[in-house]
Image (tube, coloured by chain):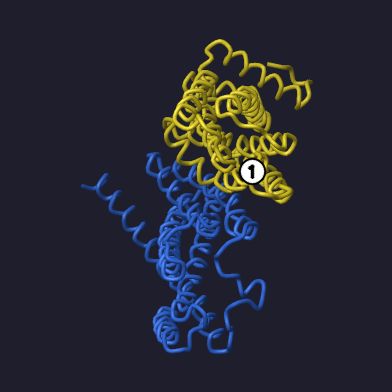
Amino acid sequence: MWWKYLTGAAMAGVIVAAFMLPAPQIQIGDASRIFFFHVPAALAGFVAFVVAAVYGAVYLKTRNLVADRRAAASAEVGLTFSTIALISGAIFANVTWGVFWNWDPRETTLLAVLLVYAAYFALRQAVGHPSTRARLSAVYILLGGVAAPFLFFVLPRMYVSLHPRDTLVSGGGEFAMTLPVGLTFGAAMVTYVLLYLWLFQLADRAGRIKEELDYQREHVL
Amino acid sequence: MPNGRSSWAGRILALLAKDLRAEYRTRYAVSAVFLFALTTLAAVSFSLGAGGLPAHYLSVLFWVILFFSALSGLAQSFVKEAETKTAVTLKLAASDDVVFFGKWTFNLALMLGLEIVLIPLFLIFLNAQLARWSLFLSVVVLGSLGMVSATTLIAAVIAAAGVRGALFSVLSLPVLLPLLVPLVRVTEICFPGGAQGSGIPELRLLAGYAVVVMAGGWLLFPYVWRE
């Protein structure tokens, strides 16, 4: 509970710092401030995918429908964060290079992750029976999880991409990682993950209430 | 079906033989796949084929035609079992591994058969030449292995879900995208006038993808096949 207040305060701090600090990258200028929002959103999308796959595996082992509900909740929040990352990336692309979309490898693989999420929900819609739906969607998200590392990590590094280099992984690079910038970025990453957890909790609770409502409708009313 | 003393490979081949025989009698999947490919190729060639096309167009068109033709027929292996109600007997008669690899082999045979027919026709209809045959054939084979590995599991999923084929394409394409992007790029290298490169990184990626997805499909299959 306390961590939600912390998340709110930290997010406010990150937003203020992102706009008050000198721009991280001199050539692009103010547009590089997107770094503080776009990258953490993509990270949250990735974490959400992993959590959904883990809950899928938990369902297959325990056959407890709560795990399936949590997998769907995580996928829902993950889809939202990935969409935010995609749109913010497109805005950055328009400001920096003049086009919204270029089929750059990074852009394409993020779109592919969104398609996996969308297909996951399409599968859930198509199957009516709860345990069959849980079983099949768990298998699908796990298969997507097998393909996902190729999408997130291998393909974007194989081809020449206009996307700025990863400064965290490869070190150095184009962004001036001064201490205030680094601190703000680190705080942003943690805060976005905490925000994901909060939204995941809400989505899970909403799912539980919906189940309860459906049960009441069928058996009581 | 074979007796309990036959080997694992023997049982897979027996399942393959059964599927091929059943397919020969109805020719449903084969007709769907070949006619789709030929119709698409004819339409493309009719509108674009007059002059020589640039390498990257040829590459994209080849893979689009191949992908969508294959997707129209690859679900058939499991959906037919569900429709003819023979799935239960198959679950009793063969172990999960045998069923997965038997269906995998059938799908691979279908894809390779399609490619044997499609590649020459593609080159003829679109007035294309191949500069690098060995790279092209390796790429096609590795791409087919990866595609078949992913789609065999997804075909089982949609057969268990009891839905028709449209969902199969929706579920397959996101998983197959890490395959499609390098395939298009490395095939472009094979045509004259295309991009330069050795193609080795892509071959490694395709081999890695095929192995990983086959292993993943094999491990996940029992959860789809059994309740």
Q: State which quarter of the image contains the N terminus of chain A.
A: bottom left
Q: Classify A201 as above or below A72.
A: below
Residue A42 position in % (x across, y down)? 50, 66
Q: Is residue A47 visible?
A: yes
| Residue at point 53%, 23% (across, down) | B81
Q: Secondary structure at mark 1?
A: loop
Residue B103, position as x, y percentages in the image: 62, 28
Whole-percent x and y of residue A23? 48, 84
Q: Position of residue A46 (x, y in %)?
A: 53, 62
Q: Which of the chains bears the disc numbered 1?
A: B
Left or right placement of residue B24 versus residue B2 in this view? left
Q: Is residue B92 visible?
A: no
Q: Colour of chain B?
A: yellow
The residue at the far top in this view is B25
Q: Which chain is drawn using blue? A: A
Q: Residue furthest front?
A: B51
Residue at x-position 38% and y-position 62% = A203
- Name the residue tied to disc 1: B193
Q: Residue at x 61, y 19 (%)?
A: B19
